[in-house]
Image (tube, helix red, strand yellow):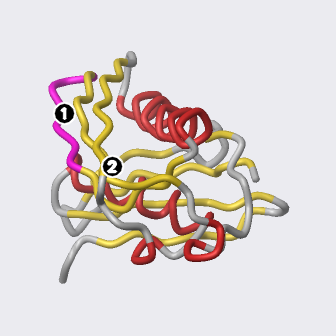
Amino acid sequence: MDAYWQHFPHEADIGVAGVAPELAAAFEQAALGLIAVICEPQRVRALSTVDFICSAPDKELLLVDWLNALIFEMATRHMLFSRFEVQLEGTQLHARAWGEVVDVARHQPTVEVKGATYTELKVFQQPDGWWRAQCVVDV
């Protein structure tokens, strides 16, 4: 089985989760889940890169910081992303995201994500050994 992302219901907002054999890959999948709230990730070409460094006191807050850093860069650069590489060293994250400037006709964005929240925030290793990184995003 491959790593994956998924959405889960939460009242007016949307939950995103990344599930993978390694924690860093779960963070990558959570980022893809975030993009999938906005548009179909496969519509986004990997033309430009943006580097990220995030730091937080624990894994859960690091996930929120990571997703909010992506949301900030998407808003300020008018970009969407489709590919991610995350490296974790304790509670520090180094990442690179690939994407392109928003093309409304091709990307067909459906909503704007305002931010990642602490609601349903969990980062843990499941009984099967796989990691799950999840939270609710405000739309």
Q: Secondary structure at mark 2?
A: helix
| Residue 60, placed above or below residue 2 | above
Residue picked out by circle 2: 27
| Residue 13, placed above or below residue 6 | above
Contact, mark 1 vs mark 2 (Cβ under 8 Å): yes
Residue at the image point whose x is 49% and y is 52% from the top: 101
Q: Quadrant of residue 25?
A: bottom left
**Amino acid beneath label 1:** Leu
Q: Position of residue 67 (x, y in %)?
A: 49, 41
Main SS category, magenta section: strand
Separation of marks 1 and 2 at Cα, in angstroms: 9 Å
| Residue 81, placed above or below residue 67 | below
Q: Quadrant of residue 106?
A: bottom right
Residue at the image point whose x is 51% and y is 49% from the top: 79
Left or right: where 7 falls relative to 113: left
Label whose residue precedes the other's in the sequence (1 or 2): 2
Q: Position of residue 7 (x, y in %)?
A: 56, 70
| Residue 56, placed above or below residue 49 | above
Q: Quadrant of residue 37?
A: bottom right
| Residue 24: mark in rendering | none
Q: Position of residue 122 (x, y in %)?
A: 48, 46
Left or right: where 123 falls relative to 115: left
Left or right: where 80 falls relative to 119: left
In front of the other: 81 or 1? 81
Residue at the image point whose x is 61% and y is 49% from the top: 120
Q: Which residues are magenta?
A: 85-91
| Residue 88: mark in rendering | 1
Q: Are there few (<14), some (14-19), or many (20+) residues within 10 Å of tag 2? A: many
